[in-house]
Amino acid sequence: MYVKQLSVFLENREGRLEEALKVLKDNGINIISLSLSDASDFGLLRLIVSDPDEARRVLKESRFSSQVSDIIAIRISHTVGSLFEVLRAITEAGINIEYMYTLSVGVEGASLALKTSDLARTDELIGGMSVHMYTQEELG
């Protein structure tokens, strides 16, 4: 099961992140999770939001470049080695983990967002494990 992730390309300058987040706030779009990375001239803001298609539309109107892509979001148990077991299964299947970030940490376990080189195979592998795979509706 996939969820939609919004990636926003930001100029690496003061205030640009705030401007993007204000567009989302002003349009009633809730941020469930985010990850921000930077290079010398730009930043990449990855978001899971309540309405990714609407978020992309309003950001485009405000002159932000963005794209929506599929990722996998899962919850794993808070036990030693649980993350290792999930990642080992993926890499042993020859699938590259392109990036991942945490969504939140709660009493029930840690949540992760994963982007791999083969989402369909990753979905199959993870589907047989004792993890919870989120749906778009659960995160929105």
Image (cartoon, rainbow, N blue to C red):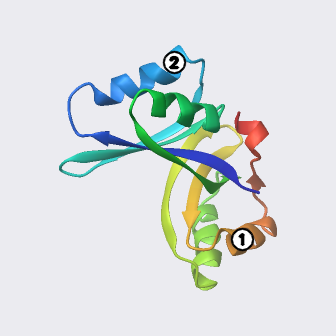
Task: Residue 99 in the image: state x and y as whole percent.
Answer: 47, 61
How many angstroms separate mark 2 from mark 1 (CA)?
A: 33 Å
Image-quadrant location for residue 17: top left
Q: Which residue is mark 2?
A: 25
The one nearer the camera, 86 or 68, is 68
Q: Is residue 37 above or below residue 106?
A: below
28 on left or right of 44: right
Q: Which residue is mark 1?
A: 120
- Looking at the rendered structure, the secondary structure element under dot 2 is helix
Q: Dot 1 surroundings within 10 Å: few (below 14), some, or many (20 or more)?
A: few
Q: Are marks 2 and 1 in contact (CB under 8 Å)?
A: no
Residue occupying image coordinates x 47% and y 28%: 61
Q: Is residue 15 above or below residue 35?
A: above
Q: Which mark is residue 33?
A: none
The one nearer the camera, 128 or 56, is 56
Amino acid of disc 1 = Ala
Q: Is residue 43 above or below residue 87?
A: above
